[in-house]
Amino acid sequence: MRPAPAAIGDSVAAIDTPALVVDLDAFERNLQTMADFARAHGVKLRPHAKMHKCAAIALRQMALGAVGVCVQKTGEAEALAAAGVSDIFVSNEVIAPAKLARLAALARRVRLAITVDSALGIDRLARAVKNAGSTVDVFIEIDVGQGRCGVSPEQAAALARQVDAHALPPGPAGAGLHLTGLQAYHGSAQHYRSAAERAAAVEQAVAIVSAARAAISAAGIDAPLIVTGAGSGTFMLEAGSGVYGELQPGSYAFLDADYARNTPHPDAPRFEHALFVKAQVMSASAAHVVVDAGHKSHAIESGLPTVWQREGLQVVGANDEHCMLKPRVEVAALPALGDTLWLVPGHCDPTVNLHDHLIAVRGGLECGAVEAVWTVDARGRLD
Amino acid sequence: MRPAPAAIGDSVAAIDTPALVVDLDAFERNLQTMADFARAHGVKLRPHAKMHKCAAIALRQMALGAVGVCVQKTGEAEALAAAGVSDIFVSNEVIAPAKLARLAALARRVRLAITVDSALGIDRLARAVKNAGSTVDVFIEIDVGQGRCGVSPEQAAALARQVDAHALPPGPAGAGLHLTGLQAYHGSAQHYRSAAERAAAVEQAVAIVSAARAAISAAGIDAPLIVTGAGSGTFMLEAGSGVYGELQPGSYAFLDADYARNTPHPDAPRFEHALFVKAQVMSASAAHVVVDAGHKSHAIESGLPTVWQREGLQVVGANDEHCMLKPRVEVAALPALGDTLWLVPGHCDPTVNLHDHLIAVRGGLECGAVEAVWTVDARGRLD
């Protein structure tokens, strides 16, 4: 593992490159803004920890009112639970019996929920939970338009009956499944550039969710079901739908370059860039410079990074360990060899997963100091 | 860190998903083929370890005749040296004094070389080497057409004089720089799809290298200079140029999906896919399936993965933790929920960097067993 690129008390200038740096002032405003939004709209907030993979951040989100966090992977749940996170929703299907056994065991220590979208998945989960003697909250995933995981409203009713058959017996004892709600996340809608496209996608999602609720009710199941979903691109729409009771945004905490390319919804709260890769110019010619942070330092699958507060500079390409920068206009000055720059990553989730540490800076990127060094607890937890 | 997804002796079926798996039989043929090629062509082989970041692999390459390995980063050099690799070339510029001090210290323990392309870089390197009392081999990087790092032939002559001024004094003692050669790598040419485009690029590179050698000679420096460069897409061209004395290919050991899209050079030796991501179907509909290995498990910046020995299946999209697969033709059967597949990653270098372990399998992906579990020693060593 790489040694941490800075220590508490270091000046910003002393942070080694490349390093993943959090501007704490912007980050805390982002957390507060989303917490206030959820409270004002009467919806639960369960931020997605696949984005930051960091217990220190999850605990801050929960201290501001989040009911828990989401993760995508069994290993992420284990890593965050080991670091003190007490309420975890695996918002993704798990089909391997060995992983379901791990989750069922984890459910003895933390409040645990999981997503299902198949009869086989429910059977295996029920067996694991029975063996472990634990209780797991179950969300049935509905395909609300992304075409990835999830089932139709009619299939959801059949799966709901199946989950209900494994429900807890009345009374304090026993292991079992608790049919808790519907997972209704539209991932691709988060990145539709126009507010109108995003609104149309969520309108469709709400209609599908409503149909699923009706089908489940018609199947004779009248337990109250929480509808959970939404991301940093659409959360204000789900919050106002009257159907969603819980929001799962992740990227709002850091705001990456891809999300910043969305045209904002007129009524949405605004977030600030709070995640940066500090990079150093290690080669310079008259026409361009090269910095020491390539796509092994920041993910580019959702687009190249932007350069923070250097409007005249543009990243024109990235290799494993290099980014090439050119002036946007001929008059713009290039930085000199040895200068440092701050890149705003294209996509925060896979960027954080490339790093072992987050360097948390207080007082800004110009002359602040390192207040905390956070471990990326679930880095590499693909399992 | 994630626990290793398999143990020595496990069957292939028992490997947890997603996991990065090496087919040892194909891998060893690839290593042998390149070693034989270099020997037959009278050029040195110095494979690029930025690709595998794994000392176990570097040592196998050296056991077959490689003179050492290349890396891109100070941290990679440290990690591989700590694991027993004794001859390391940092084929990249390093400008931070703290990193140069680390490299100069490392040069007391292993044979170390580095690339320079600026007067400032040489000054700082000379100071670090003097402070450490060590010797470092120096390669001047020439821009041979990629337009990334490196200088022109005329600038190379000036830098060569500067390096020479810090040359070792005669006799056994003392610290200093040793002007060793020219770094002349054309990265983008590796991925030009047609053999003719690649040949044209290397022809241009050879002309630029020859001009640089002439300029350096005209500046009064007559030390023998090794020209090093080439990658898995062009190495047969540099080897036949009469100018290059050392080859730096990396990907040949694993052969990713991107390299497989190149039209091969007619005289080039052939390599086989030897790196795979084992993935499991965790959601299935009538029209598509979803596996549990997204772009946090395999890099997609050079294209989506292919599916090994499932011609009828195609990866149509990837998110952080999901890949979506559809049949290429309507008649092709989809795998079932819980089935496992082998993805051939789009780009091996950043894929390996996402994993803590390489699972080395003997006897094939169908019914082989785990022979070794290799640590990715320099995983995350961006520094």
Image: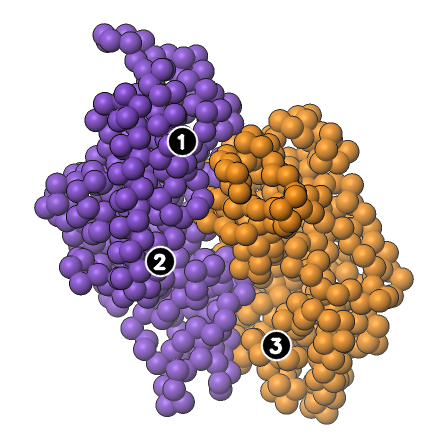
Chain colours: A orange, B purple
Q: Chain of mark 2?
A: B
Q: Chain of mark 3?
A: A
Q: Quick check: A63 above or below B151?
A: below
- Disc nearer the start of the sequence (2/1): 1
Q: Going 47% across and 59% down the picture, which residue do you hit?
A: B301
Q: Nearer the viewer, residue A221 or B337?
A: B337
The amino acid on which the numbered mark 1 sits, given as a three-letter code, is Gln
The amino acid on which the numbered mark 3 sits, given as a three-letter code, is Gln
Q: Give the secondary structure at mark 2.
A: helix
- Pointers 1 and 3 in contact (C-beta within 8 Å): no
Return the mark for residue B155.
Answer: 1
Q: Quick check: A363 above or below A74?
A: above
Q: Going 53% across and 42% down the picture, which residue do you hit?
A: A287
Of badges 1 and 3, nearer the viewer stands 1
- Estimate the x, y position of residue B140 in percent, counting from the top left: 35, 31
B226 with respect to B377 (left or right): left
Q: Chain of mark 1?
A: B
- Estimate the x, y position of residue B250 in percent, counting from the top left: 30, 48
Q: Nearer the viewer, residue B84 or B200?
A: B200
Return the mark for residue A146.
Answer: 3
Q: Residues within 10 Å of mark 1 (few under 14, many from 20)?
A: some
Q: CA distance from mark 1 to mark 3?
A: 54 Å
Q: Residues within 10 Å of mark 2 (few under 14, many from 20)?
A: many
- Estimate the x, y position of residue B122 in percent, counting from the top left: 43, 23
Q: Quadrant of residue A88?
A: bottom right
Q: Tell which residue pokes out farthest to the right in this image.
A: A40
Q: CA distance from mark 3 to mark 2?
A: 33 Å
Q: Going 68% across and 56% down the picture, which residue do you hit?
A: A251
Q: CA distance from mark 2 to mark 1?
A: 28 Å
- In this figure, which residue is indicated by the disc labeled 2? B191
Q: Nearer the viewer, residue B175 or B285?
A: B175
